Image: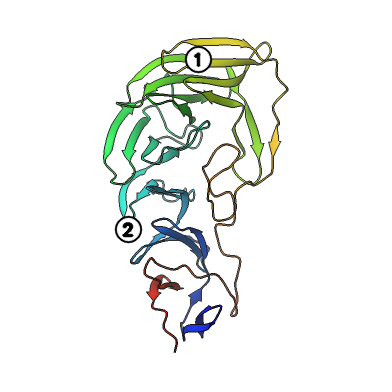
Amino acid sequence: MLSVVSESGVLWHEPVPDARPYRIVALGPPALATTCGPDLTPTTWAVSDTATAYPGMLPALCLPPLVALSPLPNLDDPDAPGVILLGPTGSVVWQAEAAELLLPETGEADRATAYIVSGKGDLAYNFGAEPRFTAVEASSGHVLWQTALEPRSPVAGVVLWGADSAHGLLSLQYDYELYEFVRFDLRDGSLGERWQLVGQPAFSLVYPGPSDEPSSASLAGSKLSVLVFPQTGPREKWTFELASGEFARSPDQGAPPPSRREDNPLPEEGSGTPSPSAPPFPQRLLPTESGTAWRIPALLSPDGRALVVAGETAHLVKLNAR
């Protein structure tokens, strides 16, 4: 027997075969909930007037209107969509395979626009020799522009460091100690000045989360500064003037950056603006309840119906006492 209850008592109950617990991730719109089947495949449910299933996908970001899902790595299905953008009803408005949603390492995420890098590569060089940089209107999925990044060799990683009102800065990683910073125009994606780094930007080891993440970067107006470790010599601060394209480098006199971070500053529901110190959904995406008896908070639709997940399906039930 499955029951939906409130503080005042039972509102709905009936036998539901294969009823599954789920976890509320974000309230949207659309609201997002995640569950996991017997085969350990996660599913994200996007809930508005109806519930839509996205098997194998997990939330990457929920800052409406910018709502994005990404898949777990799957070597058996390399053509699986890398980024899916959802509209307020939970339907797909844009998707791309072999792609990654880029969030700025400094400043707040742009809720109106999704910045995405995509390209066919391999395990070592994810984006290959012809990566593309795309700006998508988050609410409609309309492609605002797309730019070929014109790398000097296959690309292992891309970081979006930040942006002012008109220009941004990203970096392309070619090897363990070979990077290239690229200034670009937010209005049309055109590329500007490029600067090569033989060495590494500052990174921090992270747990839980990716093995490392960029750190020690700051944005003040149009001036973006990044701590770097040249292959030879002491660490430096590289400063990029986004508005003019001017560049300066100077010895770094500050304290060494921390090498490890284990804190999780966001609540489980993932509210807040993602940043290097606050990943969007760092843990607890899947329910921990199991067995024949469990209790979870119910996700309610805008009209007050409760989400019930049973097997591979879900429906919204009207809460009338029986």
Q: Secondary structure at mark 1?
A: strand
Q: Earlier in the sequence, mark 1 or mark 2?
A: 2
Q: Nearer the viewer, residue 3 or 209?
A: 3
Q: Find disc 2 in the rendering and name its residue.
A: 89
The residue depicted at 61 percent of the width and 19 percent of the height is 228
Q: Is residue 218 above or below residue 11?
A: above
Q: Could you say which quadrant of the image residue 205 lies in?
A: top right
Q: Amino acid at mark 2?
A: Thr
Residue type (three-letter) at the residue carrying disc 1: Gln
- Are the residues tagged 1 and 2 within 8 Å (C-beta)? no
- The answer to whether residue 78 is visible is yes
Q: Which mark is residue 243?
A: none
Mark 1 Cα-neighbour bin, 10 Å: few <14, some 14–19, many ≥20: few
Vertical comparison of 217 with 121: above or below = above
Q: Residue at x 55, y 57 (%)?
A: 285
Q: Nearer the viewer, residue 137 or 214?
A: 137
Measured as percent of width and height from the top left, residue 84 is found at 37, 48
- Spot occupied by residue 250 in the image (x, y as percentages of width and height): 61, 10
The answer, for residue 151, to whether it is visible in the render is: no
Taking the spot 33% from the left edge, 52% from the top edge, the residue there is 87
- Say whether residue 273 is left or right of residue 84: right
- Measured as percent of width and height from the top left, residue 13 is found at 47, 85
Taking the image as shown, residue 124 lies to the left or right of residue 119, namely: right
* Quarter of the figure with the C terminus: bottom left
Query: Horizontal and vertical percent for residue 117?
Result: 40, 34
Between 101 and 48, the one nearer to me in the picture: 48
Residue sitting farthest toward the front: 8
Would you name the residue on which mark 1 appears? 196
Q: Nearer the viewer, residue 300 or 77?
A: 300
